[in-house]
Image (spheres, rainbow, N blue to C red):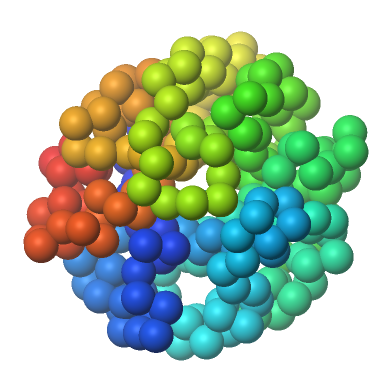
Amino acid sequence: MLKVKVAPSILAGDFARMGETVKTLEECGADYIHCDVMDGNFVPTITFGDQMIRHIRPYTSLPLDCHLMVLRPETRLEGFARAGANMATIHVEECRENTVQMLRLIKNYGMRASAVINPNTPVESIFDAVGDADMLLLMSVHPGWGGQRFIPETLEKIERLRTFCICAGKPELDIEVDGGITEENVKDVISAGANVIVAGSTVFRSNDLKATIARLRGE
Ligand code: DX5
Ligand code: ZN
């Protein structure tokens, strides 16, 4: 069984106190900080850009896992790398058939490289990325907002992606799942083959961050 990692999404946090928030998440046992970057174009919502990454960077030594819901992510990569992002995840829908090239570009900037697909994008669309990716992300809600319900069809996509990774000789590739994950459905997500769990509302609505993060990790 792969080690399960929990990546709380700061989208659900208090934007006026983000430094303290990421420090607290680290103290409470988070493995990564999931940063939802939205540009108001790829998705209707606007959140923050690389400036937020630069500002929170001194408050944590955890990897900053940047989910780029933006048009033309290739134009943003340098800014995120300079700001201290450790990982950049780009949407296959915005890669115009060049996912592999984009992953290599991310690595050239010194970040771990990851690709993501939306719920309506077939899982086969991400198979090409398996060879070059450090992680792959499957969206289990439509991107743009926190607090939505988990789309159950994602479970089959996770299974198919894990099987593909095994057959491609990368059985331990990190598979991250993002959206609507709760303490109840996380077990199904992990047994389907995912090992990096994004959780926004579930973590931030909790009165005991440490216990919730531990339970999401299956402890
Ligand atoms: C949605 C974001 C998610 C979101 C998850 O576009 O990519 O990371 O913050 O939030 P919850 O866990 O509340 O669904
Ligand atoms: Zn996300």
Q: Residue at x 21, y 58 (%)?
A: 205
Depth check: give the residue in front, 49 or 57.
Answer: 49
Relative horizontal placement of residue 137, taking residue 77 as reference (left or right): left
Residue 129 in which image quadrant: top right
Relative horizontal placement of residue 35, taking residue 212 as reference (left or right): right
Q: Is residue 1 visible?
A: no
Q: Position of residue 85 (x, y in %)?
A: 60, 70
186 in relation to 21, above or below: above
Q: Is residue 97 visible?
A: yes
Q: Quadrant of the N terminus?
A: top left
Q: Position of residue 167 (x, y in %)?
A: 61, 12
Q: Residue at x 68, y 25 (%)?
A: 121
Depth check: give the residue in front, 155 or 214.
Answer: 155
33 in relation to 136, above or below: below
Q: Quadrant of the C terminus?
A: top left
147 in relation to 86, above or below: above
Q: Which residue extends farthest front?
A: 44
Depth check: give the residue in front, 105 or 69.
Answer: 69
Q: Residue at x 66, y 52 (%)?
A: 43
Relative horizontal placement of residue 79, taking residue 67 as reference (left or right): right
